[in-house]
Image (spheres, rainbow, N blue to C red):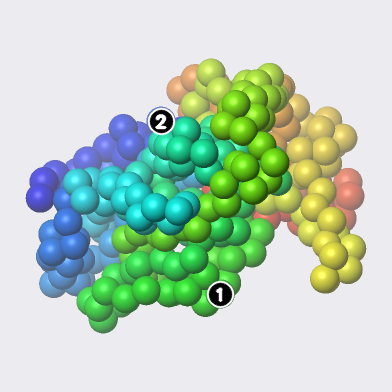
Amino acid sequence: MIINENEPMSKHTSFKVGGAARYFIKVEDNEELKTAIAQAREKRLPHFILGNGTNLLVSDKGYDGVVITLAGVFSAIEDSGNGSFKVGAATPLGRFARTAMKLGFAGIHKLAGIPGTMGGAIYMNAGAYGQEIGTCCTQVTILDCDGNIRTVSSTDCAFGYRQSIFQKDKATILSATFQLPTANAQGKSVADLEAELAECMAKRKASQPLNMPNAGSTFKRLQTGAKDTPTQVAPGYYIEQAGLKGLRIGGAEVSTLHANFIVNAGGATAADIMNLSELVQKKVAEKFGIQLKREIILLGEF
């Protein structure tokens, strides 16, 4: 277990902003994780489990609590055969997606470009290009608030668009188990999956500001239509129609490439990014009567 005090969170988020965490602890197994959480409780401090920090905005004031990052056993991929995999919460989503694809399994290969960890992907039910992580997940192993390790079925995970039960339940995700279909069962080869992934990666590169610090989509897609058959509308459409591409506050900018991305264009603070996101919400609401909901997770006081 490694413990650092006053750790700059700008080192651990894709936005490259944020103040210091009071404590920053790296754990490598379940016992170290339990100890870290227990220490936070003893100090009467909140704790936060950090993945890759690619969907996170940390306050300039920092986080007066304990940030815990997972490593070691939490980065393992266990192949049980026949498309069954158990994947640790710290495993990069792209690493697992590519590993499974090379072994001839489909279902999540289009998610390989998402820069988060498995824990974050399960927490948010990450998705892209018609695939979502929750679709092929059969169960999730967690450390609950009472310190017990248990499994949660995919049904009880309550996966929905960018949501899961873990956003309400304060349990810690340890690993996820998947049952993936073979490429052959879908009438495809590994080469076909690789070609589909290459197409997705090309689209991502052409349409997203990957060369600038960002945290992915700023706002969630809008759900319209009937409850049972909702239609998702990209928030970037409304942001662009409101003429907000290129809008800046300090070093934060609405991307000129993709309107649903706010980027750190140089020297941005967390306050710049937060204020810009709120201004975008305000202007879209004034023009279209639509309330955009933030997809990025906030940590600390704003």
Vertical arrangement, residue 145 with respect to residue 28, above or below: below
| Residue 232: percent from left, percent from top | 80, 52
Front position in the image: 90 or 191: 191
**Which quarter of the picture shows residue 40?**
bottom left
**Which quarter of the picture shows residue 223?**
bottom right
**Which numbered disc flags the more N-terminal residue, 2 or 1?**
2
Amino acid carrying label 1: it is Thr
Front position in the image: 259 or 274: 259
The 10 Å Cα crowd at callout 2, few under 14, some 14 to 19, many 20 or more, is many
Residue at 32% across / 61% down in the picture? 174
Front position in the image: 177 or 287: 177
Residue 183 visible in the snapshot: yes
Residue where numbered disc 2 is placed: 16
| 2 or 1: mark nearer the eye | 1
**Which quarter of the picture shows residue 11?**
top left
Amino acid carrying label 2: it is Lys
SS assignment at label 1: loop
- Residue that lies at the very extreme toward the bottom in this rendered image: 146
Residue where numbered disc 1 is placed: 155
| Residue 108: percent from left, percent from top | 56, 45
Q: Which mark is residue 254?
A: none
| Apparent side of residue 271 relative to residue 219 in the rendered image (left or right) | left
Vertical arrangement, residue 251 with respect to residue 291, above or below: above
| Residue 293: percent from left, percent from top | 68, 55
| Residue 252: percent from left, percent from top | 57, 29
